[in-house]
Amino acid sequence: MAIKSYLAHPHSGQKEKLINELLALKNCEIIPAENKDVIILVTDTESDSDDDILKQHIETFNSLKLLALVSGFNTPKNDL
Amino acid sequence: MSATLTSRRIFIKKMAATAAMTAAMTMFPGIIFASEQLAGISEGNLDWKKGPCRFCGVGCGILVGVENGKAVAVKGDPNSSVNKGLLCVKGYHQTMCIQASDRLTHALVKKNGKYVKTPINEALDLVARKMKSTIEKHGKDSVAMYTSGQSTIPEGYVASKLMKGAIGTNNLDCNARLCMASAVTGFLTSFGADEPMGCYEDIDHADYFITWGNNMAEMHPVLFSRMLEQKNNRGAKIIDFATRTTRSSTASNRSILFEPQTDLAVANAICYEIINNGWVNTKFVEDHTTFSKGLTKMGYGLEDNYSFTDKPTKINFAEYKKFLEDYTPEKVEKYSKVSAKDIKYLASIYGNPNKKVVSYWCMGMNQHTRGTWMNNLVYNIHLLTGKISQPGNGPFSLTGQPSACGTAREVGTFTHKLPHGVVTNRKDREMAARIWKVPVERIPAKPTYHATEMFRAVDRGDIKFIWTQVTNPLVSLPKTKRYTAGMKKDSCFVVVSDVFPTPTSDVADVILPASWHIEKSGLYGNSERRTQYWDKMVEGPGDTTPDAWMTIEVAKRMGYGDLFPYSKENHAEEIYNEYRQFHEGAKHGMAPLEVLKKESGVIWPYVNGKSTQWRFNSKYDPACDNGKDFHFYGKPDGKAVIWQRPYEPAAEFPDKEYPFWLNTGRVIEHWHTGSMTRRIPVLHKAMPHAYVEFHPDDAKALSIRDGENVKVISRRGECVLPASINKRGLPTKGQVFVPFFDENMMINDVTLDAFCPISKEPDYKKCAVKIQKA
Ligand code: SF4
């Protein structure tokens, strides 16, 4: 499994749009900042390849300015 | 999924979210998240143990979550004043390499060309036997140890005691020679005392941060985020002065680019402007400084057995002022490519008596064939303006490695050093002999090999036994090709102690399995003179053993047991208590272990139960006893030295045949040669291999596309890498940049082993290369 957290920075005025786009995704949880233009994004996928696909998909969002990785945990399933 | 699996998964997700929130809080002071998000982050059954981060010299405090004897999580220590709970991407993932499938868990001895798994005691017998027989046959100076700024304080201490006190050779040097030696010689020549006078709290007070050739956003990320916090909160300004546009440049208020090597000239031009505009703090200069000049045209150390000793001569202010006439902003802009306007702008910041300024630097100034001079020149700026040793005002040389200060510089694992002072000083030798309980005549008074020369001596066959600990020289040395070939020769018996296999262990005769950071107790000392202790947190696998204990076991087997009377369980503590005696007194007193066990690190000098945050300032430093406001007590006359140091060209520079500068360095994801971080999946995936950065105009002229493989060729070797255009960094036109973390793309086969003649630190930032399509 791959669990990662990012800071997602929206383009100016696009925070709500980005929140809605991220909320529509299955493997994402978000924590938007109340008073700043940044969203905490936590992704939780079954495998590295799923994780890659998800990240690539998120990066196509026009509302997204920058996706900065903060932490990632990649624990083999049998170690859980 | 079972209940346990679900809760583990939820826990990890909470950890990941917390890490991101902590990062966001530092980047956006005052940021608010809905309160329900912050509540209820369960910490499971974890036992959180404190220590310092394993990686860089910032020295962040970490808390390691241990469950059933395994390290399962890392978070920032909120009690650490260094990082206040924040970590960078490397910090969060540090323990994830411990269980790598190729971890060295047992000793390996090469027999008939093959590595054979060997009980640790037998391997240590062999190491001791070999070391002893080599000394008997070829003399004491035929054996050497090469250690690290990542060795703990006890590890460095016993290595020094074995080599200098027991065997009686100065053949001990360390990889901090490759990153910090110019900072040391800079401090010693200007102030007579090593290490920065200020501390990280300067960040909370400064109006300006001027970074000299230093990409702090990637190399000292937690400190950089503290600076960004001050930029956002108080309007503090960051000026990035560099040869390449980086993440630091784009986050700064101003980015000013200069031609490689001309930082020497620009620093002199700033001093010219300060004097010319009447911005000198005359009282400070008269009371607390003297002026000197040294030898020039020293060469670059390119030949074997090169030696140089500077001959300082006193000069006066008028002579210094005259010398600076060659460095008017108008003259310097012609070759530095920094406009006279920008030079004047930089000078006006330093010259403004109402603004507090901190200068930061690291490898850009230290890995420089005139590194000592460059350090002196930045000190000159701060001394002329009196902006030093006060909260928010000061020059601050950052370290790269987690204990380059604590171990390499303070314990003194350089050939010329002792735990207190230098081998050339009789009093220092006497102190070492007394504490070590050895005859003073046994400690030789002459330094022998610095890092580059040590590996040249291996290649020449002069060193016949070498033991490396916690370091990977066959990826990190410049012009590595020569030294790899040298280490493979039968003339030298090679012992490598490490946690993972590396290109260095690949050439070893014996590989010793070392404990990783949290599998042993230890102490590190960071950039701001902060000593941090940690207790062993988890058991290491197989026969893994702390490096200090392996050194002690070898010493005992060589017949020096009486000098190493430490216990296996408590050796780190016992060694630290012995070592502390070297630094007793107000100038360098170190905190007792009981204090270090409680606190998240303590800054030395630790005097009367208190840390000294700003040295040399009588308001804060009890060691000042000259009755004045400042006392540079490292120098016999109590005064700091302003040095006359000219601009001189680099050892090698672009020409028709090799038209590009090659600059090498690091990336945020990887720790130095990558032996640990490349085994952490998330970091490896984020930065899987090295690359060569081009300026887009150069790439266009060469018809090179992004991602295309190209050859970087110098007079010494070549390296094939994918091109990187307009991605993470942007070199100036005529320059390429390559990170050195990737052992499969050995850029150090291409670099030049020229070094600063005073510090002997190599220049990894400048040599000439040509580019071909691969
Ligand atoms: S900034 Fe340095 S010390 Fe802090 S977490 Fe990152 S690597 Fe570790």
Image: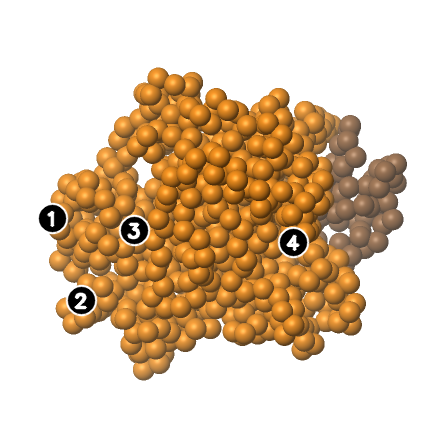
C-alpha distance separating marks 1 and 4: 55 Å
Which chain contains the residue that carries disc 3? Answer: B
In the image, residue B710 sits, relative to residue A8, either above or below, namely below
Q: Which residue is mark 2?
A: B139
Which amino acid type is shown beneath numbered disc 2? Gly
In this rendering, the answer to whether A69 lies above or below B287 is: below
Q: Residues within 10 Å of mark 3 (few under 14, many from 20)?
A: many
Q: Are marks 3 and 1 on the same chain?
A: yes
Q: Earlier in the sequence, mark 4 or mark 3?
A: 4
**Tag 3 and tag 2 share a subunit:** yes
Along the line of sight, which residue is nearer the eye, B233 or B596? Answer: B233
Mark 1 falls within which chain? B
Front one among B354 and B88? B354
User: In front of the other: label 2 or label 4?
Assistant: 4
Q: CA distance from mark 2 to mark 4?
A: 51 Å
Q: Pick whichever of labels 3 and 2 is earlier in the sequence.
A: 2
